Amino acid sequence: MVWDAALQRYTFHTFTSMTEPILECIPNFSEGRDEQKINAIAEAIRSVDGAALLHIDASPAANRTVMTFAGSPEAVVEAAYRAIACAAELIDMTQQGGIHPRIGATDVCPLVPLYNMTINDAIDCSTKLSQKIGNQLNIPIYLYEHSASQHHRKALPSIRKGQYEGFAEKIKMPDWAPDFGPKDFNPKTGATIIGARDILVAFNISIDTQDAQKADRIAKRLRTSGTTEITENQSVKIPGLLPRTRAIGWYTSDFDCAQVSMNLLDYRVTSPLQAWETCKAIALEEGVQLIGSELIGLMPESCLLEAGTFSYLKQEQDIPADKALLVLAGIEYLKLNQVKPFHPQEKILEYALHHAGLI
């Protein structure tokens, strides 16, 4: 396909002149409405020398905030601890509600090795962080992805299944005892999921309807796990169209429309462009159109270079040598600036790292 050729040209690159390791952390907090609480958590991150807060993504409808920061492994682990401690103090899960699945005040805290670190280095960091939080903050901790202690805990949705409301019973099950921290339910903080993972792109596509059921049907067609249909009293498993993709559909009052919310677990396998093009085709079958997309957190530059290249090729135009033009074309093609502003210097991972003086 055209996008395959384009993607081969642009991949997330290593700065070979760098010697210092850089670790990224992207904690998701179950608070997206109270600015004072969000700012306090952000200040906890900023209070650590060597850790740079790159971006804050808050959603009132989801009642969730995603913060992205990076720096030296030691500084990032300390900043993550302080942020999770602050969230545990300020967020009361007994009063929390929102459309996004969650199990705790800090729902999930991924650690991503970016430069001069191995995934094993990141696993070590996740273990140290988990032990400290479990011991000092008394929060049940589950390790996931590359850090998972058991295979059935590797996938985030598996741990989160049942959500906060079901965790008081789930935590009692032998297969779901926490890896660190207390073995009983903490009603105020809930539980937290921590682990080393690869770069993930959180990509939401808005469609021109308020019908969440249509978005959900599209999501089931797209996600790797697919869906199950009942035909002639038999269950038939229908695989999804996109590999390495998780997706759900919902209505968001943030934009007054339905969205297909996706986690692209490996952007080299399924990129935002591939997700956009496939979603567009399935949406037409549902009688709806795509009106824009939203990036939660940051994405590698190559995702936009690929989309921009595809846009020029589709119009049968020469591909410019200027990367800035390709990035702008990619933003336009994916309509990343339609539902809310998209600032490349804040939303493209390499640019944000450079602006923070980390690369």
Image (cartoon, rainbow, N blue to C red):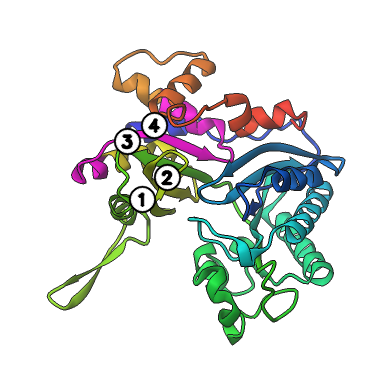
Specify the amino acid type for callout 2.
Thr
Question: Earlier along the polypeptide chain: callout 3 or callout 2?
Answer: 2
Question: Earlier along the polypeptide chain: callout 4 or callout 1?
Answer: 4
Residue contact at pointers 1 and 2, CB within 8 angstroms = yes
Residue in front for this viewpoint, 219 or 210: 210
Which numbered dot is residue 242? 1
* Residue 313: quadrant of the picture: top left
Residue in front for this viewpoint, 62 or 113: 62
Residue at image x 40%, y 55%?
248
Residue range (magenta):
281-308
Q: CA distance from mark 2 to mark 4?
A: 14 Å
User: Comparing marks 1 and 3, which lies closer to the viewer?
Assistant: 3
* Residue 159: quadrant of the picture: bottom right
Residue in front for this viewpoint, 288 or 98: 98
**Residue 75 in view (yes/no):** yes
Image quadrant occupied by the C terminus: top right
Specify the amino acid type for callout 4.
Ala
Specify the amino acid type for callout 1.
Leu
Residue contact at pointers 2 and 4, CB within 8 angstroms = no
Question: Earlier along the polypeptide chain: callout 1 or callout 3?
Answer: 1
Question: Earlier along the polypeptide chain: callout 3 or callout 4?
Answer: 4
User: Comparing marks 4 and 1, which lies closer to the viewer?
Assistant: 1
Which residue in the structure is indicated by mark 2?
A: 270
Which numbered dot is residue 111? none
Q: CA distance from mark 3 to mark 4?
A: 25 Å
Which residue in the structure is indicated by mark 3?
A: 290
User: Comparing marks 3 and 2, which lies closer to the viewer?
Assistant: 3
Whether residue 299 appears in magenta in the rendering, the answer is yes
Which residue in the structure is indicated by mark 4?
A: 5
Residue at image x 47%, y 41%?
254
Question: Earlier along the polypeptide chain: callout 1 or callout 2?
Answer: 1
